Every structure is written in C-alpha cells, then in structure tokens.
Amino acid sequence: MAALTFNEARACVIEKVGAFSRAETIEIEHIEIEHAAGRVLALPLCADRDYPALARSVRDGFAVRVCDLPGEFRVIGEVRAGEISAQRVGQGEAIEIMTGAPVPEGADGVVMVEHVSRDGGRIRTDRTAVPGEFINPRASEARSGDAVLPAGMRLDYSSIALAATFGVAIVPVFAKPRVAILATGDEIVPVRETPREFQIRNSNAYSLAVQVARAGGIPEILPVAKDTSEDTARLIERGLDSDLLLLSGGVSAGKYDLVETVLADLGAEFFFDRVRIQPGQPLVFGRARGEFFFGLPGNPASTMVTFEIFARAAVEILSGIERPALPFLLAPLTGDFRHKTGLTRFLPASLSGDGSSVTPIAWQGSGDVPSIARSNVYLVAAADRAEWKAGELIQVLMK
C-alpha cells in the first residue's frame, strides 16, 4: 500500500469516518445546562423571544429626541435596567437612562452622561446624534424562532450563556463515543510497577486517554496485549466492541509486530498503513467488524502526534462534529531552521506567550517524552521546503 501524504491521510480519515458516522445516527442525550460545556449540540438552538425584547440603551446617559440636539433639556425621570419608564419623552425633555434599560417612548437616541453638563433638573449638551445612537433595537441580536446556534457545534462558555439567555435549561447533545485504548508489547509494564532495564511503563495509554477525553470521547484503557497472536486477537476483539479502537505499538515491520496480521485475520479493511510524516510513519487506519481502528506507532511522541493530527478527527466526527479542524497558527522563527524534504515533520517547539516567536526544542527522537512535555506547540515543517530563515513565518500546531 502506497504511503500517503499528511493531507491525503487526514482527508481519508475525515471522508471514511464521516461516511459511516453521520450525525443522524448518533444517539442524542438531554442533559442539564450546567453539565453541557464541551459537549456537541445535537439540535439547533433557537431563540424563544426577540433579543433584546425591547430597544435598550448601551450607555449610561440620557434618552432624548435627536432632532432636539444640541441643546438644553429638562430631565423628567429616570429608568434603570429591569424596569420600564411610564413617561414619554417630548420636545426638550430627557430621561436619565442606565445601560441595559429599555428606551422610553418618544426617545430615539442616547447622549452619554460624559457629554452633558447638569444643573439641577436640567442638562445641556453640544453634541449631535443620529437616530438610534447608543440604542440596541428590538430583535437586533436575534428574532424569536431564529436558530442562533447550529447543530454540530461544541459548546463553550459563550454558547452556554446563549442557551441560558433563551431558557434552554436542558440541552440536547450527542452521546460521547466510547474509545478503547490498547497498548501492545511484552516490554510494557503498569505505571505503578518498577520496570526492569529492558522494560517501559505504559505511558501511551494514559496520554491517549487524556487526548480522547479532550476530543470528546470516553476512554477505556484495556490490558496490555502481549506479543502473541492469541492475546492480541482477544484484546482487539474486545476493543472492537467500542465506537473506535486505538492500538499503540505493533504496527512496524518487526517479527513481533502482529497488529496488522491479527486485524487482517479478523477481516479488516485497511485504508492506509503508512504516512509520509515524522514522527509516526507506520500508521494504520482501517475498519473491522463495523468499527474504525487506528494502529498508532508505539513510540510516545509518535502516538501523541498521530492521535492529534488523525485520530482526534475521528473522535470528533463520532462526537457529532461534521468538520473537524486542526488549530494551526503561523509564528516567526527565532533562528534558522532546516530539515530534509520528503516528510511533513511535527517537532516539539516553544511558542512565546504572546505568539510573537517560536523556537524548536532539541529532542532525541520519537521516544523523548521530556522534550514533548516541555513543548507547547508542534513546529510543522512542510515536506516540500528544506529551510527557513530566522524571522520567517512557519506553521505551528497547538498542543
């Protein structure tokens, strides 16, 4: 099977998972608004009334007829947010008004309090205005019945505020996909065990669990599969009971890299088994027994990177998001950078707090977890470009 480019492989994942996981097939849950942050909206959120329901002031000041400006006005009352004035503004009259308060009848503009001088019950201003100045008209932000949030949107704090604004106390969201995580290899021991010199602790399962949860899934860590066909097959079959299976390790060309052989014996369809990226070239993506799987390379950096750029999209689609996107930015390099063309590389880097510069972090290859942990972005070196000079913009992927 020919190796795919980064863009080809990502497009393949989105196309294949999207074709079998349309939003209408995902179960809908109805949950309380205080628990809905981070979930994906399953139905459009509609306004239950005009917003604002009345024309309201966006400044503290005085409601007047703009045709009377500039001039002197008699203050006939006051209106605060949360009440309606029973008085009507007439010629040469003003009503003191607070931000958010409904605009009294007769007024068609607001003069800011900073722009008037006051003498007892009268004010004077030399300002002019146009009708509607500092007023939010009725329904200027939403009309009753309008869809104000589309289905398929991940809810953040602002969309939760909008749901609360329109009285949506119970929010319809897509059910979270269940994602099985299976590390493979005789060399892997549990986190709480002291490894021998030739062993490593099972860090990949825990990094993947965090990544799955962040993408909107429910992670389930399975026992480590030993390097036998029988144990690997048993645990893969268990993992295929979930909505998505993530395997870590066992996908290279070694004698005991059994994952692809076992999956083939289970009737798997393979969409690709190699991508022209670093880290993470030996990446497998396919479908078996109706469920999608990824065979991620076993080196920690490879596992983390390939999840973020490929498997995360699958989790998001299975969560109800139709168009998953990667958080790419451009930032100027602090120094010259070069690499060998042919592969798209995702390398640990440090983006300054204000985003004004990015610095590659020296690392010892895809097993170097400390360097990945010290980074806050991945520097993305395009496959068809060999070098960048200090100060030139380069693409980075947020972690």
Image (cartoon, rainbow, N blue to C red):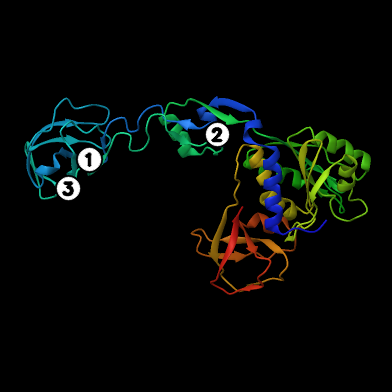
User: How far separated are the C-alphas under marks 3 and 1?
Assistant: 15 Å
Q: Which badge, 3 or 1, comes first in the chain's sequence?
A: 1
Looking at the picture, does residue 333 appear above or below residue 48?
Answer: below
Task: Mark 3: give few (<14), some (14-19) or many (20+) Cα within 10 Å.
Answer: some
User: How far separated are the C-alphas under marks 3 and 2?
Assistant: 42 Å
The answer to whether the residue labelled 2 contacts the one labelled 1, judged by CB atoms less than 8 Å apart, is no
Disc nearest the viewer among 3 and 1 = 3
User: How far separated are the C-alphas under marks 2 and 1?
Assistant: 37 Å
Q: Nearer the viewer, residue 363 or 78?
A: 78
Secondary structure under tag 1 reads: loop
- Quarter of the N terminus within the rendering: bottom right
| Residue drawn at 68 percent across, 37 percent down | 21
Residue under circle 2?
41
Label disc, if present, on residue 60 of the rendered structure: 1
Q: How many marks?
A: 3
Q: Amino acid at mark 1?
A: Asp
Is 85 on the left or on the right of 280, as rendered? left
The answer to whether the residue labelled 3 contacts the one labelled 1, judged by CB atoms less than 8 Å apart, is no
Q: Amino acid at mark 2?
A: Leu
Task: Mark 2: give few (<14), some (14-19) or many (20+) Cα within 10 Å.
Answer: many
Q: Amino acid at mark 3?
A: Ala
Secondary structure under tag 2 reads: loop
Residue under circle 3?
129
Q: Which badge, 3 or 2, comes first in the chain's sequence?
A: 2
Residue 219: % across, % down: 71, 37
